Image (tube, helix red, strand yellow):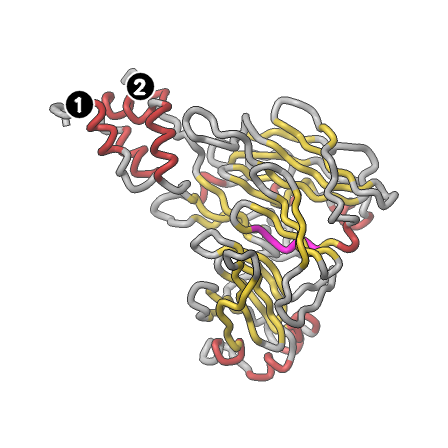
Amino acid sequence: MDVMDDDALCLVLERVDSHVSLICAAAVCKRWRRAIADAAFLRRYRSLHAPAVAGEFHNGAWRSNEGPVFVPSSPSMVDARHLSLDFLPNDPGAWTVVDSRGSLLLLLLLLMDMRLLGNGFPDMVICEPLTRRFEIISPPAEHIKEGRSFLIDVTANETGGGISISNFRVLCMFHCGDGVMHTAMLTAGSSWSEKSICHAVPNFHSTKFLGRAGGSRYFCVEGTSLVILDGSTGDFTSSVFPAIGVFDFDMERCNFFVTELRDGKPRIVTVSHCTLKVFARLGSGEWALEKSVLLWQSTRGLPGYNLLFFHYDQDILTRGTGSVILSPWSVVLCPQFAEKWRYSINLETMEAERASCDMGLMVYRCDLPWPPVLHAHLDR
């Protein structure tokens, strides 16, 4: 490699297949470290390679007090102990993940008295688990009765990196008990500022958060409108909710949600009459059925299978990227009917397997930080 000029070396290094492998390459020698640490190289590399996924966080069953749990994408790549949230103030069980973006998590402090009494809007914390850095964020207003917060992207820096613990935005939608919806934006290093509200989201009582896909957040309003929050800009758009058949719009229990598959594109997933359907958005903007599966057939042969489970509706327990965890609704209502029987459907293959645990309503992807920390070793 010593006979190779710097431009040729960079071309070779740009083809290193992963973020982790790039860090390993930087440890080879000082020359490689300097080449990789160059901002222009990092920007080009980021444009050619998808972010490295460290794994996913989930909040576990809603009755659990253990706090968020991290599941590595590959145990050989990431040691789960390095992404523990034990560095956060208060007991880990007091926090719940409400959003993630890049290498950051957004969490709410949910103390028991808040859960029982519904008083106030709790403090938030934004953190980067791998570097164990965090910042506590106060609510955007006093006397908030209900709210929901999201991480929003920022402009990419010179290394191609975007959102980080020192460069982030948080969007909060809330009301103070008067029924009037408010929206505020917080940028790292500054205070909350009011943001124009989306007319399509009149209030929380008629709005259901459906999930995340392609960096955006999706909502259903009164079962008639599909509202999208652009995760890059923080802007809202709305359209008529697609005609995807019969579905149950219930604020407490909803039989449809939005997620993404490996292509990063949004899908609407419905579960009705023991049939799971996946709808994809066409180039024209319309939604069309992409695939479907009969749940009572796909799960046959799994340990604990009982055809009687499918005489009841299926409850959506966990919405993941490319997967969903379900359970017969009868088991949720009447635990004595049987031991809770959970199973997952792979939305890519539509194959079923037993699910060992309840991972909470959603899972939250967490990437490795970018750019990688290399500069401290340049003089070695």
Q: How far apart are marks 1 and 2 (CA)?
A: 19 Å
Q: Is residue 79 left or right of residue 252?
A: left
Give amino acid for label 2: Leu
Residues shaded magenta: 208-212
Tag 1 and tag 2, C-beta contact below 8 Å: no
Depth check, front residue: 235 or 337: 235
Q: Where does the image place residue 136, in percent across and percent down from the top left?
A: 65, 30
Depth check, front residue: 280 or 82: 280
Q: Residue at x 64, y 35 (%)?
A: 170
In the rendered structure, does residue 308 fall within the stretch colored magenta? no
Dominant secondary structure, magenta: strand
Callout 2: SS? loop
Image position of 50 with respect to 341: above or below: above
Which residue, as the protein is rendered here, is positioned at the far top?
379
Is residue 325 among the parts visible in the rendering? yes
Image position of 238 with respect to 8: above or below: below
Image position of 31 with respect to 78: above or below: above
Q: Quadrant of the C terminus?
A: top left
Q: Which residue is drawn at 11% across and 24% down?
A: 3
Tally the numbered discs: 2
Image quadrant assignment for residue 50: top left
Image quadrant assignment for residue 231: top right
Say which label, 1 or 2, has the lower sequence index. Answer: 1
Which disc, if any, is residue 5?
1
Q: Where does the image place residue 347, in percent across and percent down from the top left?
A: 48, 64
Depth check, front residue: 317 or 290: 290
* Residue marked by disc 2: 378
